[in-house]
Amino acid sequence: MTLWRIMQLEEHNAYANMAIDEAILESVRDARSNPTIRFYRWNPCAVSIGRFQSMNDEVNVSRCTSEGVTCVRRITGGGAVYHDYDGELTYSIIGKEVLFPKSIWESYRVICGRIIKGLGKIGINAEFSPINDITVNGRKISGNAQTRREGVLLQHGTILYRTDVARMFSLLNVSKEKISDKMIKSAEDRVTSVYSLSKVSFQELYEAIMAAMTEYREFEMGELSPIEASRASELVRTYSSNSWNFSR
């Protein structure tokens, strides 16, 4: 049975969070580290964009700067996401591709199935919504993104604990005409959050998702290796650079 490394909930800034994910991916690729599941929060709050998006097109950069919200480009695809420190739990899972289904759709379904099981442990009946969302009664509670590089799969995603749609709209590039009470209500009708469905604490959510991610897996708790930590420090310089974040 494959031995997994589990990294307990940490908090980092956006650049470090993305750098750590990539450093682990490289270490798993080189067989220096076991496949890894990590949990993290974003401190300070941040906006991330997908690998192929334009920061200036998607994000109100000046507003983010004035409010101390960090902007970063991911190596995974998908759209712009607002990451609130109090509002979400983020996970990443990194392992050789052979550990997952070859089909992208099926790999999303299998990995998201663990999140769905975790939500079930706190009384929330969620379902997989292809290709990469988890919904409750048709409303999004989790978004996920994936990349595959040199035989390694990296998927990371968010589980919404509380949702501040108004703040999200103020930081993403939504026209002023669209930022209306009606628009905000419409967006709120399309998303939901753990706290609105089950008055559990953030810690209880984390423990439920942790339990589901580790169920029937052989694992040990671990930390970044010195090589990974050193590489992550190098990658922070990339992730914090305008040449990366504004490359499109």
Image: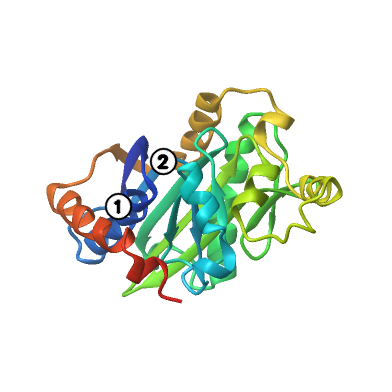
> Mark 2 near mark 1, Cβ–Cβ under 8 Å?
yes
Q: Position of residue 235 (x, y in %)?
A: 25, 60
- Which residue is nearer to you in this view: 168 or 68? 68
| Furthest residue in direction right, as rendered | 182
Q: Position of residue 229 (x, y in %)?
A: 19, 49
Any part of residue 150 in sight: yes
- Which residue is nearer to you in this view: 192 or 97? 192
- Residue at 67% x, 63% y is 130
| Quadrant of the rendered image containing residue 110 | bottom right
The amino acid marked with disc number 2 is: Tyr
- Of helix, strand and loop, which one carries label 1? helix
The amino acid marked with disc number 1 is: Ile
As drawn, 72 above or below 217: below
How far apart in space, not on screen, are marks 2 and 1 (Cα)? 11 Å
- Residue at 42% x, 70% y is 246
- Residue 40 disc label: 2
- Residue 20 disc label: 1
